[in-house]
Image (cartoon, rainbow, N blue to C red):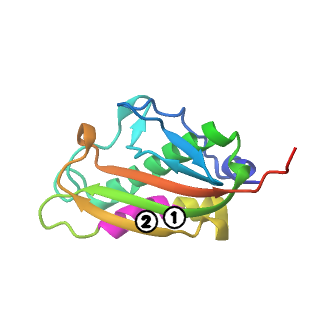
């Protein structure tokens, strides 16, 4: 159902980004999948770099958050096999590489939240944090991490 929704929306998931350190992109534990922080990689390169409010505007950063969300979903799919196994998006933490005085982090992270709503409907409604930070790895404009609850699996 969610895989079909992606197709209907004309969205294809990117390849799962390779971790830049000693960690994995996502881990399943206790019926949940936790992603590592995902930056706006497109084709192996940071697509949105710099400080939001100086180098990028809020609209560009919103798009960066959407890319981060797609990278999170790709990491989740790599662990559970299909987005159709998601029961609920539980939590999104968004980190925005913010210029001094930039305070519209929630509007930026809406890029991810809106996308999750488009794909998952009610199951995409989640708790969230939108945090302004001074720096992010690789000078990424946004970094996102996600927690999803998976559907119970039949005993077998």
Query: Is 95 placed above or below 127 here?
Result: above
Q: What residue does disc 1 label?
A: 114
Q: Where is residue 156 in the image (x, y as percent from the top left)?
A: 88, 43
Classify residue 14 as left or right of residue 155: left
Quadrant location of the N terminus?
bottom right
Segment tinted magenta in the rendering: 105-114
Classify residue 37 as left or right of residue 131: right
Q: Residue at x 41, y 28 (%)?
A: 44
Query: Is 5 placed above or below 43 here?
Result: below
Gap in angstroms between the C-alphas marked 2 and 1: 6 Å
Residue sticking out furthest to the left: 100
Q: What residue does disc 2 label?
A: 110
Q: Which residue is drawn at 37% across and 43% down?
A: 39
Closer to the camera, 83 or 43? Answer: 83
Query: Is 144 placed above or below 87 here?
Result: above
Classify residue 17 as left or right of residue 79: left
Q: Position of residue 21 (x, y in %)?
A: 35, 31
Q: What SS does tag 2 mark?
A: helix
Query: Is 59 placed above or below 76 here?
Result: below
Q: Which residue is drawn at 40% across and 37% down?
A: 41
Closer to the camera, 123 or 29? Answer: 29
Q: Where is residue 55 in the image (x, y as percent from the top left)?
A: 19, 50
Classify residue 50 as left or right of residue 144: left
Contact (Cβ within 8 Å) of mark 2 with mark 1: yes
Q: What SS does tag 1 mark?
A: helix
Give the class, few, some or many, for how many residues have Cα within 10 Å of label 2's Cα (few <14, many ≥20): some
Closer to the camera, 87 or 54? Answer: 87
Magenta highlight: main SS: helix
Which numbered disc covers residue 11? Answer: none
Give the class, few, some or many, for how many residues have Cα within 10 Å of label 1's Cα (few <14, many ≥20): some
Q: Where is residue 122 in the image (x, y as percent from the top left)?
A: 66, 71
């Amino acid at each position: 159902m969610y895989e079909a929704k992606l197709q209907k929306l004309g969205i294809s998931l990117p390849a799962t980004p390779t971790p830049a350190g000693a960690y994995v992109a996502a881990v399943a534990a206790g019926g949940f999948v936790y992603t590592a922080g995902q930056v706006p990689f497109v084709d192996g390169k940071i697509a949105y770099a710099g400080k939001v409010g100086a180098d990028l505007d809020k609209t560009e950063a919103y798009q960066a958050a959407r890319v981060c969300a797609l990278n999170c979903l790709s990491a989740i799919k790599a662990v559970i096999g299909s987005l159709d196994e998601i029961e609920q998006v539980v939590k999104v933490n968004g980190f925005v590489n913010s210029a001094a005085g930039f305070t519209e982090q929630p509007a930026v992270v809406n890029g991810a939240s809106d996308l999750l709503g488009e794909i998952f409907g009610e199951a995409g409604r989640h708790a969230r944090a939108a945090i302004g930070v001074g720096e992010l790895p690789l000078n990424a404009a946004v970094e996102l991490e996600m927690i999803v609850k998976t559907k119970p699996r039949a005993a077998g």
